[in-house]
Amino acid sequence: MKRFLALLCFTLLVSGCSVKQEALHVTPDKVQQLTSELTHLGHDIDYQEARMLAYEALLYPQILVERYGLVYPPTFHNFLINTGIKERGLCYQWSEDMITHLKSLKYQSFDLRWGVANKGEFDEHNSVVVVAKGAPFWTGVLIDPWRHSGELYWAKLGDDPDYKWVENLERSRYYGTIGE
């Protein structure tokens, strides 16, 4: 049975299920849209810093696509991980890698937080939330690279039609920039 699954997975991989890098461009339009969302998080947001964060949030998932050997859709990639065929690329791993990368850039205008939806359930989902420095979690912008296999999805927390987000404070303290 495991051999059959491996053969099926291989067939799907070579038949076009892998994520195509050229489809994931960072466009000036997307950078500007996300920059605008980020600058509206607070009165003291530095525009250049917001633009740099927007660019990195859009670009870094493409690096992770290559690193994970990502296949589409994300749930199928999860299946490959859970069956031992792939090693990395679950939503919490995207979040760990994204927040670690963004934290290394030491933004002064923003805090990075850990969001979770459906905690402890089969469909639990994790992602990074960006807030203005010192602002409450619920005021943030969700940045979710897992949902569209490396093409960044972002939204204000209350505007996400798919998930109701809460903060995982323990992970925010461990990975994020609060409590520093």
Image: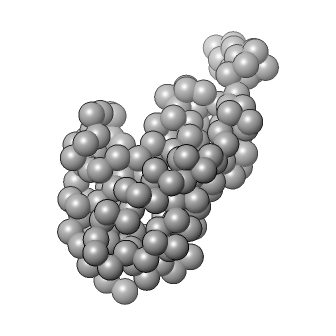
The answer to whether 131 appears left or right of 145 in the picture is: left
Residue 12 seen: yes
Measured from the top left, where is residue 139 in percent x and y?
23, 61
In which quadrant of the rendered view does residue 123 lie?
A: top left
Q: How is the image coloured?
A: one colour
Identify the residue at image location x=51%, y=54%: 32
Residue 178 seen: no
- Furthest toward the right, the residue is 14
Front position in the image: 168 or 19:
19
Identify the residue at image location x=24%, y=73%: 135
Front position in the image: 81 or 168:
168
Measured from the top left, where is residue 179 in percent x and y?
31, 83
Q: Is residue 116 above or below residue 113?
A: above
The answer to whether 175 appears left or right of 12 in the picture is: left
Measured from the top left, where is residue 65 in percent x and y?
66, 44
Identify the residue at image location x=45%, y=42%: 153
Front position in the image: 135 or 170:
135
Q: Is residue 61 above or below residue 111?
A: above
